[in-house]
């Protein structure tokens, strides 16, 4: 399972990770469309805990073969309960989209982080 991990002591809150995520997934520079967020002294990113899977009433959230939790846009009804119940506050919504979005541990932000404050951890799916 791929999990985006963080070393908060190395984060300078430069927001390069947010910008790279926005460029990669939304073709924009707006950080509010990033799948990860710098918020106060924390980096909000999915830990693949699975709580969102449990709360989704229509089974639109699933774990793929690599252990990464994803949202099936075709099944999602846009209730955003997963956003409210995410213990990491790592499920996001934006007025431009009918469904929530989250980090899928693609690693683009890791490649651009100038201080190596984020990295991908590979764990056995449990």
Image (cartoon, rainbow, N blue to C red):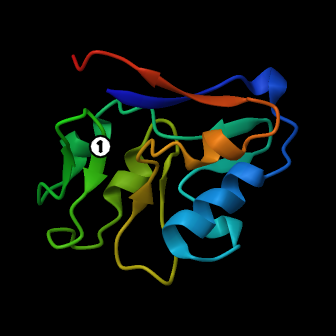
Please tell me which residue lies in front, 75 or 121: 121
| Residue at horizontal 19 percent and vertical 42 percent from the top | 64
Please name the residue shown 45% across and 41% down the image. Answer: 105
45 lies above or below 93: above
The reply, left or right, for residue 18 in relation to residue 69 is right
Would you name the residue on which mark 1 appears?
69
Q: Position of residue 50 (x, y in %)?
A: 28, 34
| Residue at the image position 81 percent from the left and 39 percent from the top | 114
Binning the other alpha carbons within 10 Å of mark 1 as few (below 14), some (14 to 19) or many (20 upward) gives many
Q: In the rendered image of this protein, does residue 17 appear above or below residue 115? A: below
Residue at 74% across / 41% down in the picture? 113
Describe residue 17's horizontal placement relative to residue 50 as left or right: right
- In-front residue for pair 3/113: 113
Lateral position of residue 118 relative to residue 94, left or right: right
Residue 85 position, x and y percent, is 39, 46
User: In the figure, 121 relative to 18: above or below?
Assistant: above
Q: Nearer the viewer, residue 75 or 24?
A: 24
User: What secondary structure is found at the residue carrying circle 1?
Assistant: strand
Which image quarter holds the N terminus?
A: top left
Q: Residue furthest front?
A: 111
């Amino acid at each position: 399972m791929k999990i985006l991990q963080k070393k908060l002591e190395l984060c300078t809150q430069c927001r390069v990770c947010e910008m790279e995520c926005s460029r990669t997934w939304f073709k924009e520079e707006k950080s509010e469309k990033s799948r990860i967020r710098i918020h106060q002294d924390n980096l909000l990113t999915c830990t693949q805990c699975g709580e969102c899977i449990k709360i989704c009433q229509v089974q639109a959230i699933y774990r793929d073969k690599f252990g990464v939790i994803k949202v099936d846009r075709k099944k999602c009804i846009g209730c955003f309960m997963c956003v409210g119940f995410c213990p990491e506050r790592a499920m996001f919504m934006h007025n431009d989209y009918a469904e929530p979005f989250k980090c899928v541990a693609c690693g683009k932000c890791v490649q651009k982080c100038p201080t190596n404050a984020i990295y991908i951890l590979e764990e056995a799916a449990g």
